[in-house]
Image (spheres, helix red, strand yellow):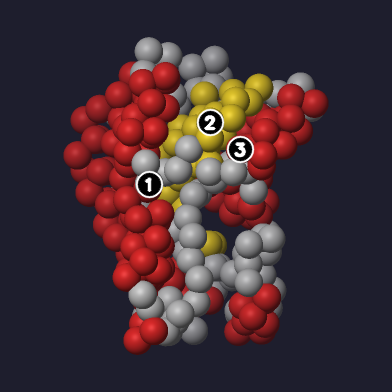
Amino acid sequence: MDVTERRSIAVIAGGGSGIGQGCALRLAGEGWKVVLVGRDSAKLEATASRIAEAGGRAEAFAGDVRDWDRMGELGASLEQEGIDLLVNSAGGQFPKLAAELSRNGWKAVVETNLDGAFFLARQLYPALRRRGGAIVNVVANLWQKGAATMAHSAASRAGVVNLTRSLAIEWAGDGIRVNAVSPGLTDTPALREEFRGLKDTVPLGRMGTVEEVVDAILFMAGAGYVTGEVLTIDGGLQLV
């Protein structure tokens, strides 16, 4: 993705680890200023330090994406300058049979994945509108099928896909494009060990890498005539 003077500021939720961190490191290496958002300030600061040591620009903003007011503080701090890109890669899930899933377990996952995606987009809307920025939501590939032990995650991710499409329609007139990427099995530290064995079911015979998902995120961020779309990066897993 080409960097210009105008397209230079990105907010990355979940920027302290995994796909979010990979995206932050890539963008900072290409000259972007990145604002890292997440609950774990130590992880954010560690990523920001890596970027600074490499000569890049990064700021850490500790906050829970489920916190409307805290995300409002983030939006207010960026409104005057504006931003070019929001990458929403904050999310969470854990396996649990629906018959055993508690109210709190359901709420924790749905609020992080779905509420968090909306809170970020809504509170950063003025900053995005100022520069005609783009949003890329990262959703787990569970939304495309039913998923045993993952009803809470699959339902919330499907909600984010529809949110992506709805915002794409509403905000197109403001020059804001809203897209999503849908990774399958991806080799990140957060991937539970029991899921790693599923790589044998992937037609391409392996898990994806963080770098491959970042490639897709940056493609969607820079595809100026694409909005409301979901790009799947799963080695063909959704086909079987």
Q: Tag 2, which secondary structure?
A: strand
Q: Is residue 66 left or right of residue 236?
A: left
| Label 1 neighbour load within 10 Å: few <14, some 14-19, many 20+ | many
Which is nearer the N-term, disc 2 or disc 1? Answer: 2
Q: Is residue 81 left or right of residue 103?
A: right
Which is nearer the N-term, disc 3 or disc 2? Answer: 3
Q: Which residue is mark 3?
A: 41
| Label 3 neighbour load within 10 Å: few <14, some 14-19, many 20+ | some
Residue at 69% in and 60% down: 189
What amino acid does circle 2 point to?
Phe
Q: Quadrant of residue 109?
A: bottom left
Percent from the top left, x then y, of residue 239? Answer: 47, 79
Which is nearer the N-term, disc 1 or disc 3? Answer: 3
Q: Is residue 15 above or below residue 240?
A: above
Q: Tag 3, which secondary structure?
A: helix
What amino acid does circle 1 point to?
Arg
Mark seen at residue 211: none
Percent from the top left, x then y, of residue 146? Answer: 37, 80
Q: Tag 1, which secondary structure?
A: loop
C-alpha gap between disc 3 and disc 2: 8 Å
Mark seen at residue 66: 1
Q: Quadrant of residue 72?
A: top left
